[in-house]
Amino acid sequence: METSTEGVVQTPSSPAAAATTADPTAVTGAAAIPPASLSPSRAGDFMQCPLLYRFRVIDRLPEKPSEAATRGTLVHAVLERLFDAPAAERTAPRAKALIPGQWDRLRETRPEVAELFADDPDGERLARWLGEAERLVERWFSLEDPSRLEPAERELFVEAELDSGLKLRGIIDRVDVAPTGEVRIVDYKTGKAPRPQYAEGALFQMKFYALVVWRLKKVVPRRLQLVYLGSGDVLTYDPVLADLERVERKLLALWEAIRLATETGDWRPRPTKLCGWCDHQAHCPEFGGTPPPYPLPVRPAADGQDVAATG
Ligand code: SF4
């Protein structure tokens, strides 16, 4: 699982800057400071739709928790906690027994998730939802055997700074290290595996993590492994250094495009069928909405600069 770790975009202290909108003719002396870090999720947001990135990172518009995403968080917590038990006790019944406690904990740490079932007074929908979480947890045991695994790390926060100053951040679900020193990076997905033609997109996040590990430890992970609990598939990829160098170049191009959009305020919507899952249609021009006033100072794009480029 990957959680957003980007910091808030800094705004200059000038009150005029704070009042500036994305009107490209509105120029102030101060320059907006682009985010200094990228996570796989936010990089993915910008590639999917620059305006979505703006809404999430710069405007920080609230988003409602979804049943699917919250179930994913719950299942991840259960799989992580199961490794607290001795190897022989890491069974499916034990894992399923962790679900109620982890759900209580999730509601304590993120009270907004309780809203998901506010209109479910008899608890039927909640029971179905928890039942689906149980099935996902149970399916994991057909894909991996936790009694034979001893993760080196779980829910590992990683951060590496590239020579350009860009920080790459993320949280890796699990890191396994073989006695030979070979590293395997594992990520759990509660959805279904993508069709083969979309596998490259799914692996982007894993190559991002591999790049961070390589930068931190000077070791190219031996294997990247995506475990799809929704469909019962495991997708693996054995990266080589050239893969990681390619991802680094792509991320630097992406960061440059983000920097340009931050400074010019030109965040273009890119409608796709994924808009159906976007919480921000009410603010999106593609759906007749208006973005909130841009909170940063802007400068016009110079001739030849393509602010929509994503590398
Ligand atoms: S609705 Fe679609 S085009 Fe509009 S911001 Fe969301 S993802 Fe982008």
Image: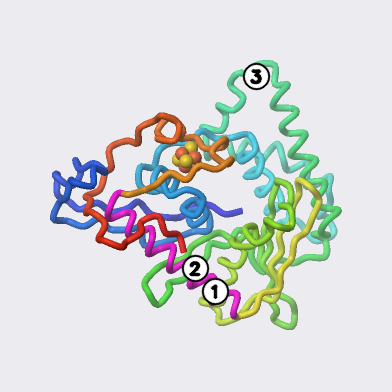
Dot 3 or dot 2, earlier in sequence = 3
Indicate whether residue 43 is drawn in magenta: no
* Residue wearing tag 1: 246
Q: Say the numbered circle drawn on residue 250.
A: 2
Element assignment for label 3: loop
Question: Of the residues shown, which amino acid type is indicated by label 1?
Answer: Arg
Q: Nearer the viewer, mark 3 or mark 1?
A: 1
**Prevalent SS, magenta region:** helix
Q: Nearer the viewer, mark 3 or mark 2?
A: 2
x and y percent of residue 237 in the render? 71, 69
Question: Of the residues shown, which amino acid type is indicated by label 2?
Answer: Lys
x and y percent of residue 48 in the render? 51, 50
Element assignment for label 1: helix
Indicate whether residue 263 is drawn in magenta: yes
Q: Nearer the viewer, residue 142 or 166?
A: 166
Q: Nearer the viewer, residue 85 or 197?
A: 197
Element assignment for label 2: helix
x and y percent of residue 265 in the render? 29, 49
Residue depicted at x 27% and y 37% = 293
Alpha carbon separation for disc pair 3 and 1: 48 Å
* Residue wearing tag 3: 120
Q: Which image quadrant is residue 71 in?
A: top right
Alpha carbon separation for disc pair 1 and 2: 6 Å
x and y percent of residue 267 in the render? 37, 48
Alpha carbon separation for disc pair 3 and 2: 45 Å
Q: Which image quadrant is residue 218 in?
A: bottom right
Residue depicted at x 54% and y 77% = 245
Instruction: Tell me the crowding category of disc 3: few under 14, some 14 to 19, or many 20 or more residues within 10 angstroms, Cα based.
Output: few
Q: Which residues are magenta?
A: 242-265
Q: Are marks 1 and 2 in contact (CB under 8 Å)?
A: yes
